[in-house]
Amino acid sequence: MKKLIFVLLLLALNCLNAQKRSKDDVELTPILGVAFSNYYGEDRLENQNLSSTQFGVDLDFFFNDRWSLRSGLLFQTMGSKVTRNYTEKLHYVTFPVNANWHFGSTRRWNLNFGPNFSFLTAAEGNGVDLKDEANGFQFGLAYGIGYKIEINEKFSLLIDYQGITGLTEVPKDNYYTIKNTYGSFNFGGVFKL
């Protein structure tokens, strides 16, 4: 009986250590998520959240088993339901550059934070083109938390939350003072390359 317990303990420890990462490891994670955005600032009035879908791919470049640099390419829709009958949608391609801290005994949890750079591809208000009135670039602060469920040594599932606080004004002119705030709940497949 003691030998069986010892063998099971060794197998459990082996499974726990399988998720460890080392320097120069790279993980590719296609993601899909449900997002909510709104404006914040002095002129946001009584806006309501705008829901949308986020998709893209994240890349984690590991320095050791605790730290990685997360970047990628994300397609995001931000904006707000300004009034009950008027909605503004701003479509961005976003490049995050985040420090990603992996923690817990198996390093399956992660906290990430850092800047992101968003480029406007389209903007509309109830079907009317607003791209000329909106800033073409948004600088933001990104932050998030996630958890990986290991399937095998080369593949895991990721569940995470990512948030963005825009630091750049949405309109080009200084008449309005509004910025984007954004959050998404994501699911992804993590491929160790």
Image (spheres, helix red, strand yellow):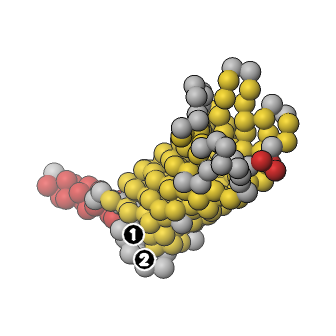
Drawn side of residue 124 relative to residue 169, left or right: right
Q: Which residue is mark 2?
A: 63
Q: Examine the image and state in which quarter residue 29 appears.
A: bottom right
> What secondary structure is found at the residue carrying circle 2?
loop
Q: Is residue 141 above or below residue 62?
A: above
The residue closer to the viewer here, 31 or 16, is 31
Q: CA distance from mark 1 to mark 2?
A: 6 Å
The amino acid sitting under disc 1 is Trp
Q: Which residue is mark 1?
A: 67
The amino acid sitting under disc 2 is Phe
Drawn side of residue 14 relative to residue 150, left or right: left
Drawn side of residue 174 relative to residue 104, left or right: right
Image coordinates for residue 103, horizontal then vertical, percent: 32, 59
Drawn side of residue 94 relative to residue 86, left or right: left
Q: Is residue 193 above or below residue 5?
A: below
Image coordinates for residue 62, horizontal then vertical, percent: 46, 73
Image coordinates for residue 111, horizontal then vertical, percent: 40, 56
Q: Examine the image and state in which quarter residue 74 appears.
A: bottom right
**Identity of the residue drawn at 45% across and 69% down:** 68
Q: Residue furthest bottom?
A: 24
* Mark 1–mark 2 CB contact (< 8 Å): yes
Evaluate whether residue 183 shows in this view.
yes
The residue closer to the viewer here, 21 or 174, is 174
The residue closer to the viewer here, 23 or 35, is 35
**Identity of the residue drawn at 57% across and 71% down:** 193
> What secondary structure is found at the residue carrying circle 1?
strand
